[in-house]
Image (cartoon, rainbow, N blue to C red):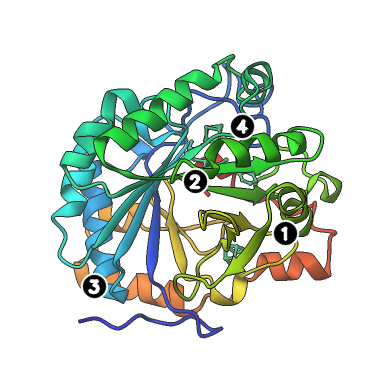
Amino acid sequence: MNTHIQDRLGRPLTDLRISVTDRCNFRCRYCMPPEIFDKDFKFLPRNDVLTLEEIAHLTTLFVKASGIKKVRITGGEPLLRQNVTHLITLLNEIKGIEDIAMTTNGTLLPKYAKSLKAVGLNRVTISLDCLDDEKFRYINGRNIGVQSVLTGIDSAVEAGLKVKINMVVKRGMNEEDILPMAKYFKDSGIILRFIEYMDVGNTNGWKLDHVVSKKEIFSIINKEMPIEPIEANYEGEVASRFKYKDNNNEIGIISSVTDTFCSTCSRARLSADGKLVTCLFATKGHDLKELIRTGASEDQLVERIKDIWVSRNDRYSEERLQQTDKKAIRKIEMSHIGG
Ligand code: SAM
Ligand code: SF4
Ligand code: SF4
């Protein structure tokens, strides 16, 4: 069994997030603002996007380089990628991969949930930012109603997938939806996780004032429905976990801005065009596609992955806490690397 390699800050490489497309059927205003991601926007040309076989091949190399066991498929919207079910089949065949998850906006789950489960997907995280239909139609920039996501959630549950919900909280957008969302999912057996709005990419006009902090989210819920902290499931878990005192059901808060977790960050990200990205806030990635397509040997690729990881010293969120003047740096868009 391969041991995990460690970066310059002693952090192991334990899991891989794979973006399978930079396209999306939503235009969430905090991620792909419709004015920028409009009909003239140049998405990646098809030839620049890794094939499903290349993705699976690279995943085996990550297993060889660092014994990763977990992968998460994301995007853009991963269910827009043709034959994504086949990718899950390929990943499920890789010796060493024990857990395959996906983050999705949920709208296409009624079509795919059953077949995804059948070929080895274990878990889905479905994004939903409020239950107010009019507001949701505005946030997603495509006038798509809440019901299509709720139907997607139902299909995932029916298919036997483990389901979590992600809600990005942005001041002025949906802080008043924290309580209705918490109430809605409290007795559902589905874990709801609140995410502090982050300054990923360059297009979403992020300001610190827009962040509703973990502390504030905690107190909004705790006032109405008392909650208490519980232990992390494992080292490096990004969500702080809480449980309701009356029914023991769980919620999470991901505090990437006000209570950072860089010191245990053990995820690598692979962009749709085959770049290895070592931090969500990176300014660029390391091109693995070029290496595969120009005939690098398996050993060379494994060594390259190791080299990149052992040189890593990213700790953007910790640095952000100390210094806020980062505006001039050009970062990779969220829809490119998938959160
Ligand atoms: N399209 C899929 C979805 O929305 O679930 C997968 C990709 S999306 C980029 C992954 C996650 O990132 C979603 O849960 C989304 O809400 C979150 N996200 C996007 N932009 C964000 C931001 N600026 N701050 C915090 N979370 C963000
Ligand atoms: Fe699409 Fe997900 Fe970004 Fe929304 S958050 S625009 S659904 S990639
Ligand atoms: Fe990891 Fe970068 Fe996020 Fe820190 S800022 S937790 S290093 S992805």
Q: Is residue 53 visible?
A: yes
Q: CA distance from mark 4 to mark 1?
A: 20 Å
According to the picture, the residue beneath numbered tag 2 turns out to be 338
Image quadrant assignment for residue 296: bottom left
Mark 3 or 4 closer to N-term? 4
Q: Residues within 10 Å of mark 2 (few under 14, many from 20)?
A: many
Q: Secondary structure at mark 3?
A: helix
According to the picture, the residue beneath numbered tag 1 turns out to be 257
Mark 1 or 2 closer to N-term? 1
Mark 2 within 8 Å of ligand 1, using the beta carbon: yes
Q: Secondary structure at mark 2?
A: loop
Residue 138 against residue 220 in the figure, above or below: above
According to the picture, the residue beneath numbered tag 3 turns out to be 64
Q: Amino acid at mark 2?
A: Gly
- Residue 118 location in percent, x, y? 16, 40
Residue 52 against residue 133 in the figure, above or below: below
- Residue 55 location in percent, x, y? 27, 50
Residue 209, numbered label: none
Q: CA distance from mark 2 to mark 3?
A: 23 Å
Q: Is residue 283 visible?
A: no
Q: CA distance from mark 1 to mark 2?
A: 17 Å
Q: Secondary structure at mark 1?
A: loop
- At 44% from the left edge and 73% from the top edge, which residue is drawn? 234
- Residue 309 location in percent, x, y? 44, 74
Labels 1 and 2 touching (C-beta < 8 A):
no
